Structures are given as C-alpha cells and as structure tokens.
Image (cartoon, rainbow, N blue to C red):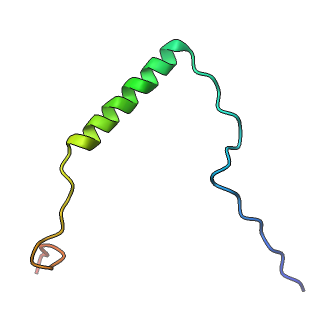
Amino acid sequence: MRRQCRVQMDLFLPLTQPGDLSGADRQKAVALLQALLMEAATKPAKEPPANGKKGARNE
C-alpha cells in the first residue's frame, strides 16, 4: 500500500482577500492596535536571573 503525501498549506498566503473596513470599524481597529502596542511597550520584559538559575522552585 502506497503512502499518500499531504500537501502543507502555505500559512503566509491569505485564504481570502481582506475586506474593506468601514470608517467606524477602522477607527476601532486602530484604537485597539494602539492600545495593545502601548501596553506591550510599557510592560517591562522578563529578564532571566543573573545567577544562571531558572527561577525559584518549591523545594
């Protein structure tokens, strides 16, 4: 019995054309994107511990 190869979907190709947003929907999307970007920019990144340990454990 011969094995069938599956075709892998290209994840970078859009499945459909993006729809045009109305003015109000576009404004909501831009405001949400701005809020998310500001939140990401203001949160400090988690830095790895300086002593080389992965973190505190319950022992």
Q: Quadrant of the N terminus?
A: bottom right
| Image quarter of residue 53 | bottom left
Is residue 14 shown above or below 51?
Answer: above
Is residue 49 shown above or below 29?
Answer: below
| Image quarter of residue 22 | top right
Q: Between 14 and 59, which is closer to the camera in this rendering?
A: 14
Apparent side of residue 45 relative to residue 7 in the rendered image (left or right)? left
Apparent side of residue 33 relative to residue 49 in the rendered image (left or right)? right
Find the residue positioned furthest to the top: 23
Where does residue 25 sit, x and y in percent of width and height? 50, 19
Where does residue 46 sit, x and y in percent of width and height? 20, 59
Instruction: Kindly identify the residue that appears in the image at 72 percent across and 64 percent down.
Output: 8
Apparent side of residue 35 relative to residue 20 in the rendered image (left or right)? left
Where does residue 49 sit, x and y in percent of width and height? 13, 71
| Image quarter of residue 29 | top left
Is residue 11 shown above or below 38?
Answer: below
Instruction: Kindly identify the residue that appears in the image at 65 percent across and 27 percent down.
Output: 19
Find the residue positioned furthest to the right: 1
Instruction: Kindly identify the residue that appears in the image at 39 percent across and 32 percent down.
Output: 33
Q: How many marks?
A: 0
Instruction: Kindly identify the residue that appears in the image at 43 percent across and 21 percent down.
Output: 28
